[in-house]
Image: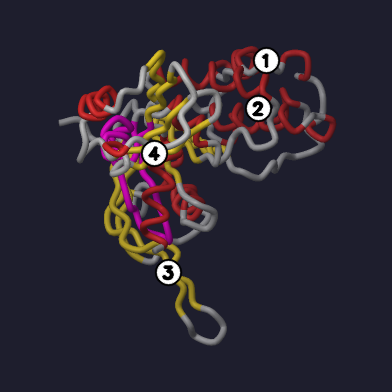
Amino acid sequence: MTQPAISIKNLSKTYTSKDGGKKHALKNINLEIPQGSFFGLLGPNGAGKSTIINILAGLTLKSEGEINVCGFDLDKQTRQVKQSLGIVPQELILDPFFTVREALDFHAGYYGIPKSKRRTGEIIDALSLKDKSEVGARRLSGGMRRRLLIGKALVHTPKVLILDEPTAGVDIELRRQLWDYVRKLNANGTTIVLTTHYLEEADELCDQIAIINHGEIVAANSKEKLLAHLENKMIIFRLSSEITQIPANLQSYNCKILKNNRLEIQYNPAEVQISKILEEVTKSGLLITDIISEDAKLEDIFMQITSKKAA
């Protein structure tokens, strides 16, 4: 059995306020991130995503639990863990006095990589930073700074790349270029861990998903299996003529009359088969000219799970 890229067991983080009160940022987190996966760690603001990343980065001390990265224990083999991880933080923190090339070169030096083995030029080319390679960080746009942060996280060729909100403030073109490069990294074996509020990104990119809410993992599985548990789907029928009221045999369904001769029906696929809905629509005498069935989206399962937990 292949060991996971990241294994988290019974991880908790508790803060103590000045009045002695306790705030539980993480509550008994158990999570395994498979090697080579494109893993989405999703959750609302304040759910605990950044706390997990900060613990992995060594910026925050955990209260309890065990963490292994590529087989290395975070507490006992800290150096090996840092060598295994590349972390791109949310904040655009860069030394303004270094050029792009200098920043990457010096960062590689921090990891003890000799000059003959540094990948500075390769990373500059891969992230389309060549035109800005001799420009200081303070003169870069937000999108270019984000690319530089990613480049710094890659100088030591980590086995796991953690991207914390990497496309915040990045325009569409830069975002597409970034994801093309990250996909290539993943295809070549790098495990990618992504946090993002753009759920359409996670839907398109990730094969494994974990959802955290109020410091607890509330769902973790492959994207396909999570979507299979979605309780509500929607099908739209385009009709040959205008409909003014719901036929009697369809009134037990969640129906809505839409403009342009359309009828929307929401249903739970675990309870009702779509073939039964088609049969009932046909029995009603409505003439169907087209059918639109929307695929389940990650946003739908995210809202379903987090709203349940909040309730």
Which quadrant of the figure has residue 109? top right
Q: Secondary structure at mark 2?
A: helix
Mark 1 residue type: Ser
Provide the secondary structure element on which disc 1 rests.
Answer: loop
Residue 133 placement (x, y as % from top left):
75, 19
Q: Position of residue 138 (x, y in %)?
A: 82, 35
Q: Is residue 190 shown above or below 289? A: below
Checking the image for residue 128, the label placed there is 1
Amino acid marked by disc 3: His
Residue type at the position of mark 4: Cys
* Circles 4, 2 touching at the beta carbon (< 8 Å): no
Q: Secondary structure at mark 3?
A: strand
Of labels 1 and 4, the one closer to you: 4
Q: Which mark is residue 147?
A: 2
Label ID, residue 301: none
Which quadrant, please, contains the N terminus?
top left
Q: Is residue 186 left or right of residue 144?
A: left
| Sequence-first disc among 3 and 1 | 3
* Distance of label 3 from label 4 (alpha carbons): 43 Å
Going from N to C along the chain, the mark reached first, 3 or 4, is: 3
Where is the C terminus found, in terms of image quarters? bottom left
Which residue is the site of mark 3?
Answer: 24
Neighbor class of circle 1 (other Cα within 10 Å; few <14, some 14-19, many 20+) is some
